[in-house]
Amino acid sequence: MKQNKYSYVWVSLVVLVFGIIFIPRIVDRVKDGTIVKTDRMNVKSGNEELAFITLNGQKRRVPEFTFLNQDSLIITDKDYLGKVYVVEFFFTTCPSICPVMTKNLVTLQEEFKDEENFGIASFSINPRYDTPHVLKEYADKYAINDLDWHLMTGEHEAIYELANTGFNIFAAEASDAPGGFEHSGLFALVDKRGYLRSRMDKFGNPIIYYRGMILEEKGENSTGETEQISILRTDIKKLLEE
């Protein structure tokens, strides 16, 4: 009987100590949301080196391109060498995801406004309508003012080749889609040497692209997909330090 009694005492002491030390920490984590954020994240923490995107065993680089920007200046892939930049495919009359994508990119513009080695490349998938003049009006509307954020237009076939083959980011004309075009709403991340990079998922595979069509402050969309602008920001900083 004495042995059982002492056993109960020791168990009680262990439970008491655990409660004193660990429960306040757990409560604090619940309050600041870190448990939820950690458990729901479907990618790695980002502390690892960013992966190179490969095709047939070769590191993928941004293909050569030449287009006109919103100021009617000729912009090529060479203008981005030495810079870390984000790539998107959009169109100015898009009634659905493009305004969200642009707002997310404006957030990144403000975050890195003092970083001379950061840029953004926006390619219109409706180049017949999106002339440099139209793109300039769009830039003014959304306060796009970074000198290294080029909104580009050009030959229709060249832009679709760049999107679907060069970046493997889907874009297509579709009469039944909002605005007459379908596109994925994904962002690509490019390093200073022109290579496509990304962090890895929880299984150790590159996520390849970042979701650009969910507002960072919203957190997730109606289907439960989480925003990825916060992790994109972290990964941009990492590449800027390389």
Image (cartoon, helix red, strand yellow):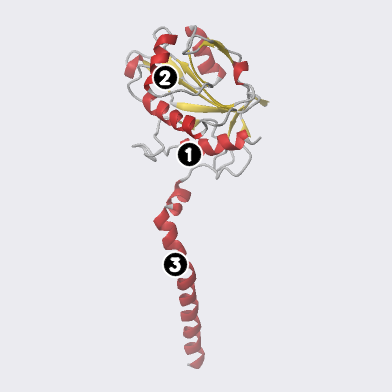
Residue shown at the point (49%, 27%) measured from the top left = 187
Q: Earlier in the sequence, mark 1 or mark 3?
A: 3
Q: Amino acid at mark 2?
A: Ala
Q: Could you say where residue 238 lies in the image, as x and y percent from the top left?
A: 60, 37
Residue shown at the point (41%, 62%) measured from the top left = 27
- Packing grade of label 2 (10 A; few <14, some 14-19, many >=20) is some
Q: CA distance from mark 3 to mark 2?
A: 51 Å
Q: Could you say where residue 176 lies in the image, as x and y percent from the top left?
A: 32, 16
- Packing grade of label 3 (10 A; few <14, some 14-19, many >=20) is few
Secondary element at tag 2: helix
Q: Is residue 177 above or below residue 51?
A: above
Q: Are marks 1 and 3 in contact (CB under 8 Å)?
A: no
Q: Amino acid at mark 1?
A: Ser
Q: Which residue is mark 1?
A: 230
Q: Which residue is mark 2?
A: 139
Near-viewer residue (237 or 199): 237
Q: Quadrant of the C terminus?
A: top right
Q: Which mark is residue 23?
A: 3
Q: Which mark is residue 140?
A: none
Q: CA distance from mark 1 to mark 3?
A: 29 Å
Rendering quarter of residue 114: top right
Q: Could you say where residue 105 lies in the image, as x and y percent from the top left?
A: 45, 28
Secondary element at tag 3: helix
Q: Are marks 3 and 2 in contact (CB under 8 Å)?
A: no
Q: Amino acid at mark 3?
A: Ile
Q: Nearer the viewer, mark 1 or mark 3?
A: 1
Secondary element at tag 1: helix
Residue shown at the point (57%, 37%) measured from the top left = 237
Report whether residue 182 is seen. no
Q: Earlier in the sequence, mark 2 or mark 1?
A: 2
